[in-house]
Image: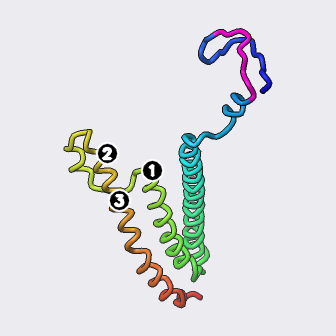
Amino acid sequence: MRAIGRAGSDRRSGACWKSTQVTLADTALETAVLPAEAPRAAADLLTRTDKAIGWVTEIGASILVLVEILILFAGVVARYVFDRPFTWSDELATILFLWLAMLGSVVALRRGEHMRLTTVVQFLPRSVRPWIDAFAAMIVILFVGEIILPASQYAQAQWVITTPSR
């Protein structure tokens, strides 16, 4: 193996070193992803994916709030200023509000600001609170898992229903 000579100082650790011999095998090990670092890389990927989903959800909810305000304002102006109400504005506002409620619950759950009973948890010792939070998260996961099938069946049954203005 060919040796590479280095001279200088390591500013991060404050150590000074002169003419250290490093082999190519050592430099290859420095750049390779070690098996112990693989879980960290997967966790970083999951964290970035979670942030991206959160960003998209929050932007979508923000846009829905803006559209909801504009539609309701246009409906009020059309009804009371021009005396010619839009027949579709109330229905569209209702549908957008349902979507806004769903996206808002996702944002609140991600931020840890979803409604829950915290009165009992506040009286528990601090060492127990993380376990209670983990238990509460598992309950949410189980509940969502339980309602997926009935919710999809309900959505399929309601798919053919049209709104009155349609």
- Left or right: residue 132 versus residue 26 is left
Give the alpha-carbon distance from disc 3 to disc 2, as whole Å: 12 Å
Instruction: Assess whether mark 2 and mark 3 are in contact (beta carbons under 8 angstroms).
Output: no
| Foreground disc of the pair 3, 1 | 3
Q: Quadrant of residue 63?
A: bottom right
Counting residues from the start of the chain, the first of labels 3 and 1 encountered is 1
The three-letter code of the residue at mark 1 reads Arg
Q: Is residue 40 above or below residue 107?
A: above
Badge 2 marks a residue whose secondary structure is helix
**Which residue is rendered at x = 52% and y = 75% of the image?**
95
Name the residue beneath numbered marker 1: 111
Quadrant where the C terminus sits is: bottom right
Counting residues from the start of the chain, the first of labels 1 and 2 encountered is 1
| Magenta stretch bounds | 16-24
Badge 3 marks a residue whose secondary structure is helix
Please provide percent x and percent y for residue 101.
46, 66
**Which residue is rendered at x = 65% and y = 9% of the image?**
16
Residue 130, numbered circle: 2
Please provide percent x and percent y for residue 73.
56, 67
In this rendered view, identify the residue nearer to me: 61 or 91: 61
The three-letter code of the residue at mark 2 reads Pro
Residue 138, numbered circle: 3
